[in-house]
Amino acid sequence: MGEGYQEKLRRLAELLLSANYPMALTGAGISTESGIPDFRSPGTGLWEKIDPFKELSRSALMRNPARFYEIGLPRFRQIRSAEPNPAHLVLAELEAHGYLKGIVTQNIDGLHIKAGSKNVFEVHGHLRTCSCMRCGKEDSFDFLVDLVESGVNPPLCRFCQEGVLRPNVVLFHDPMPRAFYDAAETLQYCDFLMVIGSSLQVYPVAYLPARVEKLAIINISPTPYDSKALVVIREKAGKVFSDLWEVLRQKGKV
Ligand code: APR
């Protein structure tokens, strides 16, 4: 790692320690080291294999729910079996030590919560529960998975016996959930935002970094916000946050 990297790491630590209300905005890139492919990395991104707008959108679910689950269930299962990696774990420790006020995540994998983070805004939903598209009743996502795996596809609501169940994730063409508006509201207090593992190409989440005074970007590939950021580190998140933790330890901060 060149001098450039160490210097950037020191700058990142300085910005974090001097911020009044530091937060993080994470995307699929923070979970690739947990074994979950992201969406747009060349060669491995999920969207190179299937067309999300066709296969995993709200209209696809309404049009052909059985096919939606044929395509989606393997990915949902892969996501649910993943474990947090050092980047998730260090972010949880930073919050526990008072150096991070909250995380806005586009990820539905729940890995920030599994890692111990408390103030997490899941702006694209999560895979813990599902809901009936007819009567609106909620159920556990495990129930949905068990149904489909036992051959009941599409999975039907056990309360009204008729409605098709849908995951409580934000699909293309879905409205944004309450968590998105809560995140936008909280970001008004944020004076330093670390963007971690997101290509920042999907709106409205990609509007959020524009509202923050100071930005740091930890992302392997370029993003539209790089020129606005005070520091851009083109390294794996797991490495950057393990090294950042070491810098804070040497400063006697953790
Ligand atoms: N460390 C740092 N960056 C990484 C790593 C890593 N280990 N692995 C991948 N990246 C970077 C990639 O270079 C890419 O720029 O993370 C970024 C992930 O970008 P996307 O795949 O576009 O994921 P994301 O930004 O979360 O997508 C936003 O799009 O399809 C929708 O709803 C879906 O929430 C998703 C949204």
Image (tube, helix red, strand yellow):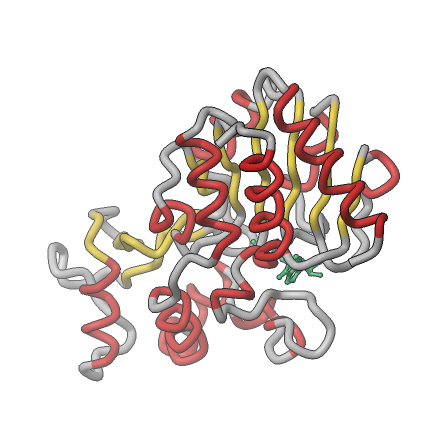
Q: Is residue 171 left or right of residue 162?
A: right
Q: Position of residue 254 (x, y in %)?
A: 48, 32
- Quadrant in the rendering for residue 48: bottom right
Tell me what residue is drawn at x 40 percent, y 31 percent.
Answer: 96
* Residue at the right extreme, as displayed: 227
Q: Position of residue 14 (x, y in %)?
A: 69, 27
Tell me what residue is drawn at x 70 percent, y 35 percent.
Answer: 12
Tell me what residue is drawn at x 21 percent, y 56 percent.
Answer: 140
Task: Find ligand 1 in the image and state its quadrant.
Answer: bottom right
- Quadrant in the rendering for residue 46: bottom right
Vertical placement of 154 versus 16: above or below?
A: below
Vertical placement of 115 versus 98: above or below?
A: below
Q: Position of residue 95 (x, y in %)?
A: 45, 32
Q: Position of residue 175 (x, y in %)?
A: 50, 42
Tell me what residue is drawn at x 64 percent, y 71 percent.
Answer: 45
Q: Is residue 208 visible?
A: no
Q: Is residue 16 left or right of residue 164?
A: right
Q: Nearer the viewer, residue 150 or 106?
A: 106
**How many numbered marks are there?**
0
Vertical placement of 235 versus 252: above or below?
A: below
- Quadrant in the rendering for residue 32: bottom right
Q: Is residue 232 visible?
A: yes
Vertical placement of 69 versus 170: above or below?
A: below
